[in-house]
Image (cartoon, coloured by chain):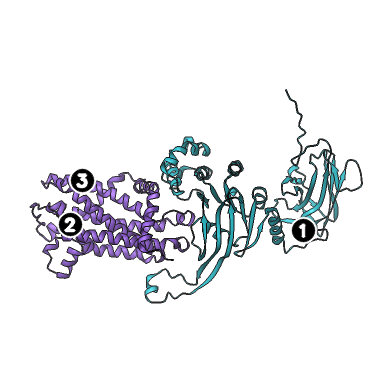
Chain colours: A cyan, B purple
Amino acid sequence: MADVALVVDHVTKSFRLHKEKTNSLKQLIAGKARNRYDTFTALSDVTFDVREGEVFGVIGENGSGKSTLLKCMAGILQPNSGSVHVSKRMSALLELGAGFHPELSGRENVYLNAAILGMSRRGIAARFDEIVDFSGLENFIDAPVKTYSTGMYVRLAFAVAINVDPQLLIIDEILAVGDVTFQQKCLEKFVDFRNEGRTIILVTHAMNSVKDMCDRAIWLKHGVVTGEGDPAELVEAYTEMMLGDRARSADGSLRRGSGEIEIDRVEMFAGSSETPVKRFRTGEPVRLRLHYRTTRAVPKPVFGFEIESLGGATVTSPCTRDVGLIPDTVSGEGYVDVSMATVPLLPGTYDLHTSVTDFNRQHEYDIVHVALRFDVMTGKPYESGGLVTMSPQWTVA
Amino acid sequence: MRASPYTVARMSLRSAMAHRNLLYLLSLKELRTRYKKSVLGWAWSLFNPLSQMLIFSVIFLYVFKSPPPVGDPSGARNFPLYFLSGLLPFNFFSIGIGVSIAGVQGGSGLIKKVQFPHEHLVFSVIVAQFVTLMIEMAILTFAMLLIGNNMLPWLVPLAVVLTLLAMMTSGLALFLAGANVFYHDVNYLWSILSQILFYATPVIYDARTLDFAPLRVLANYGPTGSFITAIHNLAYDLRLPSYERLSELVILAFGTFAIGLWSFNRMSPRFAEEM
């Protein structure tokens, strides 16, 4: 068994919720600071361990105790009972740029921030160029950070945090900051970290990153570990719980949304056949027909679908708004056809989810999870791994 | 299993040493950011004691027409410099503690997000204030030379006494800054207490000439009184303080520092949830 990087051993953490805030000596002296508080248990008897070199996910709703657990692991909060053992050099990224001082220059803040994160002066000096390089702020490094834009600020902070060179990295929702390019850069850095065999603990409710990145996960619910193990299964169970109030339809799919318009049937046609199928071959032309039904006229609906591998990877996720196909209103019954000249999916089983939303993609009329499960069989070209084929042309010189 | 105060203090000192780079950078931050955005910058740290010196000199010499304290054995008779040699260390003490209290309170963003030795929020303030004090004392030494009071032979023992003062200041600052996280009254209480202490310390007067006995004892042997008297001995009278006094200062310095560090380390694990 691999060495253990972090052990959380029967950790319980509760907070006092003061009914009146008694931060005053007068009340203390007058004896009025009697303990008028309720106790709120944020974590109760949480036990798990994280092995060296694994990517470990912690999932849970808001208020499930994720942040408290994170702070206990990072040593910021002391548990009421139980203990946390860390055997590696740890860096906890709870907030980027904590301790940045606006009046100081970027250079001075890099040194200060890295020292706060526990680096030695020699260590910082050795990595300084790398940090500046990663941030891309060579020209601004001697300007005070108060003149930086939010993006620049975050980039510099992240560059410092990632270069502290931890063997154990604890990340709190950090991928949610910055623009798309920056997020991509962060993601690449995490993948590098993972490939280098470092231990990462990811605390998030971004389910896709848990499924894609984690080797193992725990599910925290009201401060109690309700599940531990395979991330895909946990995410499935978690998603199901989150969708709990929505009816589970007869064919095993999950449905949510306000229901003014619903997709009640999806048909798939392969080649030129007019008989619906549930399987086709790699490279075949495929047509999808989404049958809808409305309870009232719905203005400007956006239809979409998503194909997901059983491993949880989203292969494609197009919608009608992408191509500017926006009907003014739809009412009654009808269908939406999508045809694809060739489908480059490689053999395997895939799930098709459908969605109908309003124009802004904010309001959900109808989301069907697993509207159709289908198989792709060996066709042309054939490849032994991956999800899709790029139709490669090989030459060996 | 409960660690003894001694072990706690020793472990805390060890972690503080391991993070000395952080201490250095935090102190640098204190020094660099203090007078940002002001035209005169660092000069402000000198104007404040100089203006106080001017005010008290006028009151003392012209309003009350009191004779200036006589240096024994130096024979110096200069109220402004007598005043300044007491005021600068006293200001270090009272401002150092006030800024420490505010520094820990203002460090809440950091305390809630990062794990680091919290005592460095206090130590960095003390270090920065001590650097300021050293510059001010250098200027004082120069002024003393101008009036013919040669302080130079007494600079080494003076540095020792000021270091002891810094230890006592750190100890009290740690305790008060920690307590202030739980009860913000400490902050307000300190601003009143430091004013009372100012008058109970021989800065504007000579403790030996006091008629009121309780105040004379307090001014002579109270914590700040004893330190300021020792500093007057070295900088104004040009002689070593008595051994009794020096022993008192050593006990005050080490005792306050140990108690402050110990109590701070008992309080600091709860900072994150109290803030």
Tell which tag, 2 or 1, sits nearer the viewer.
Answer: 2
Left or right: residue B72 versus residue A121 is: left
According to the picture, the residue beneath numbered tag 3 turns out to be B139
- Confirm whether residue B205 shows in the render: yes
According to the picture, the residue beneath numbered tag 2 turns out to be B230
Left or right: residue B49 versus residue B13 is: left
Front in this rendered view, residue B193 or A225 = A225
Question: Pointer 1 indicates a residue of which chain?
Answer: A
Q: Do labels 2 and 1 share a chain?
A: no
Disc 3 packing (10 Å; few <14; some 14–19; many ≥20): few
Would you identify the image quadrant in which residue B161 lies? bottom left
Residue that protrudes farthest toward the right in the picture: A274
Left or right: residue A116 versus residue A385 is: left
Disc 1 element: strand
Which of the two labelled residues, at mark 2 and mark 3, occupies the earlier sequence position?
Answer: 3
Front in this rendered view, residue A243 or A163 = A163
Tell which tag, 2 or 3, sits nearer the viewer.
Answer: 2
Please name the residue shown 41% across and 44% down the image.
A104
Would you identify the image quadrant in which residue B251 lies? bottom left
How far apart marks 2 and 1 lie (CA) works out to: 82 Å
Front in this rendered view, residue A239 or B244 = B244
Residue that protrudes farthest toward the top in the picture: A397
Q: Are marks 2 and 3 on the same chain?
A: yes
Disc number at residue A254?
A: 1
User: Taking A10 as reference, is A170 above or below it?
Assistant: above
